[in-house]
Image (cartoon, rainbow, N blue to C red):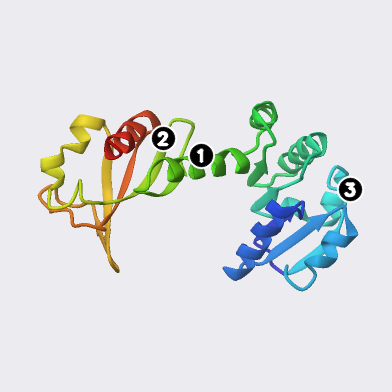
Amino acid sequence: MNKDYAVIGLGRFGGSIVRELRVLEMDVLAVDVDENRVNEFIDIATQAVIGDTTDETVLKDLGLGNFDNVIVAIGDNIQSSILTTLLLKDLGVKKVSVKAQNDYHARVLEKIGADVVIHPERDMGRRVAHKLASSSVLDYLELSDEHSIVEIMAEEKLSDQSLLDLDIRAEYGVSVIAIKRGEDIIVSPDPTVNIQKEDILIMIGNDDDLTRFEKSLNR
């Protein structure tokens, strides 16, 4: 069976990834050392197996070296996470995405070749903080340590003005890359387009610049 993804670690984070990938109709191999967790996913994942992924023989027996995408979502055992990541890269996995417990863990993962380092608690914390701090912020997506995409609801303060009038890029250094208007999406909007109340502005920029713009909406 041609499996597109493997998820190692079936806790809350890893389990949610397995479920969402299956909703997207992807083939998923789910792996955990805990038999009870594996049993939870027998009817969800394409295949669910018990295995200690710090053992290179287990990884080879599971054929993980043939996967293009492996997500390491091991919970609190940082040593197991690091060793599993190292072995997967040695086996030639093209893309290894790993959940980091803290910044130290993340630095080690980057040094040993993890392709994507995920900070679920930190990233979710940032999203929640931005949404709480401004009623206009609908969503917040971190692109890197310094750049993000944010969705902002155009309220009274922005309505009936064009992007040219607001001069957002010149004043704040951020760009409006699209406008959601009902069911329509205006990509790369013309600067003369008037913003309507309840339009959703999709903006990209440096985190500090986006924060300055968010603060301006709350004044």
Q: Nearer the viewer, residue 153 or 33?
A: 153
Marks 1 and 3, Cα distance to the nearest angstrom? 39 Å
Marks 2 and 3, Cα distance to the nearest angstrom? 40 Å
Label 2 neighbourhood size at 10 Å, few (<14), some (14-19), many (20+)?
some
Marks 2 and 1, Cα distance to the nearest angstrom? 13 Å
Q: Is residue 37 left or right of residue 16?
A: right
Residue sitting at 78 percent across and 40 percent down? 76
Q: Can you identify the residue that label 2 sits on?
A: 147
Q: Is residue 25 left or right of residue 3?
A: left
Tag 2–tag 3 contact (CB < 8 Å): no
Q: Residue furthest bottom?
A: 43
- Judge depth for marks 2 and 1 and give the one in front: 1
Q: Please, what secondary structure does the residue beneath circle 1 have?
A: helix
Q: Is residue 87 above or below residue 42?
A: above
> Mark 1 vs mark 3: which is more N-terminal?
3
Q: Please, what secondary structure does the residue beneath circle 3 have?
A: helix
Tag 1–tag 3 contact (CB < 8 Å): no
- Circle number at residue 57: 3
Q: Is residue 48 above or below residue 114?
A: below
Q: Nearer the viewer, residue 180 or 158?
A: 158
Tell me the kind of residue under disc 1.
Arg
Q: Can you identify the residue that label 1 sits on?
A: 126
Tell me the kind of residue under disc 2.
His
On the question of residue 66 being in view, the answer is: no
- Judge depth for marks 2 and 3 and give the one in front: 2
- Judge depth for marks 1 and 3 and give the one in front: 1
Residue sitting at 67 percent across and 31 percent down? 102
